Amino acid sequence: MNRVISYGEIDGRWLPYMLLLITGVSIALMLPMAKIAVAKGIDPLAYAFWQATGAGLILSVFNLIHGSAGAKLHKRYFMMSGLTAIAIPNAVAFSIAVELGAAITSVYYALPSLVTYGLALLLKLERIQRLRVAGLVISVAGCAWVLLGNQSVAMTSSSINTMLLGLLIPVALGVGNIYRTRAWPKGATPNQLAPGMLMGGAFGIFMYLMLQNRLEVLLFAHTEILLILIVQSLITAQSYLWFFKLQKLATPVFISQLGFIIIPAGALAGVLFLGEQIGVDFILGVSVLFLGMWLANHTK
């Protein structure tokens, strides 16, 4: 069940890996941009809302121009996909990135592999493979090394709670990886589903803010935030378009390994754009993580 479905003999073999790399790097770029915007005063939930809304509108217009619109309104699929892939993980990531930094926050994106694999085993979408299990466990150990060995964040009760809050990211993404594959609407294309998922995520955030009587946080007056959101929406639009193409090609467990691309890309983005520091523990932890990734994929 872990075999990647390909379009062709040679291209199909490498296409999923190329999509994994492109999507992972694109998602990683969201973290430093979100940290900058939140530092300038926008609420993390508002940032996640406008990011998803802007990207959803861009893809919708793209579909209209290229004649690929016309998907049925798969309300349940859009809402569930939006909540698990957009609303929950992005809102949490943008919130904790302010305290933990983009580099450390990116580490949480490696953990969905364990959640996804566990759910895939329960649903009999995958079979137990010792090498894959060992690889995923080693990868998680690498993540733990990065988090516990991090010297840039003081270990206070607040930072520990923030780190625990971050666990919502892999749980939501892991559930979403399984759901999107199992519930993929018959006949729908990635181009049609990507904007629906993004708008579903935005709607979920909007409803949450409305129930909390916090809709005013969606307003902002900072021009720099608007510019960041425009760039962020463009990056997000193409990220999730590639994301859905990858979803159609590969298994949920393969997709869950996006985190192994997001971590180094997020760390590099944090260093280049935010001046964050990464120490020996980060480098060693990520090295262990990649060893686990190689083992998890070195299966027949």
Image (spheres, rainbow, N blue to C red):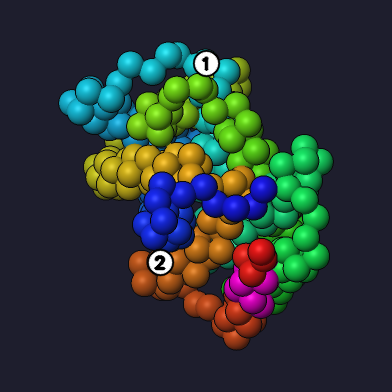
Residue sticking out furthest to the bottom:
280
26 or 151: which is nearer to us? Answer: 26
Residue 274 part of the magenta segment: no
Q: Mark 2 points at which residue?
A: 269
Which secondary structure dominates the residues rendered in magenta? helix
Q: Which of 16 and 10 is in front in this view?
A: 10
Residue 248 tag number: none
Q: Local crowd at mark 1 within 10 Å, few (<14), some, or many (≥20)? A: few
Indicate left or right for 34 with 162 as reference.
Answer: left
| Residue 29 visible in the snapshot | no
Q: Give left or right: position of 193 versus 254.
A: left
- Looking at the image, which residue is at 30% across and 32% down? 59
Q: Specify start and end residues of the magenta stretch as a single range.
A: 288-296
| Image-quadrant location for residue 53 | top left
How far is the residue under mark 2 from the one under mark 1? 35 Å
Residue 25 position, x and y percent, is 41, 59
Q: Residue at x 54, y 52 (%)?
A: 4
Q: From this viewpoint, which residue is outermost toward the left?
A: 65
Report if residue 293 lies within the magenta region.
Answer: yes
Tag 1: residue type? Lys
Can residue 263 be spotted in the picture?
Answer: yes
Give the label, 2 or 1, closer to the camera. Answer: 1
Q: Where is residue 149 in the image (x, y as percent from the top left)?
A: 69, 76
What percent of the width, then of the height, locates residue 216? Answer: 45, 24
Residue 166 in the image: x percent, y percent?
Answer: 66, 51
Q: Mark 1 points at which residue?
A: 75
Could you tell whether 272 is left or right of 45 in the image? left
Q: Nearer the viewer, residue 29 or 91?
A: 29
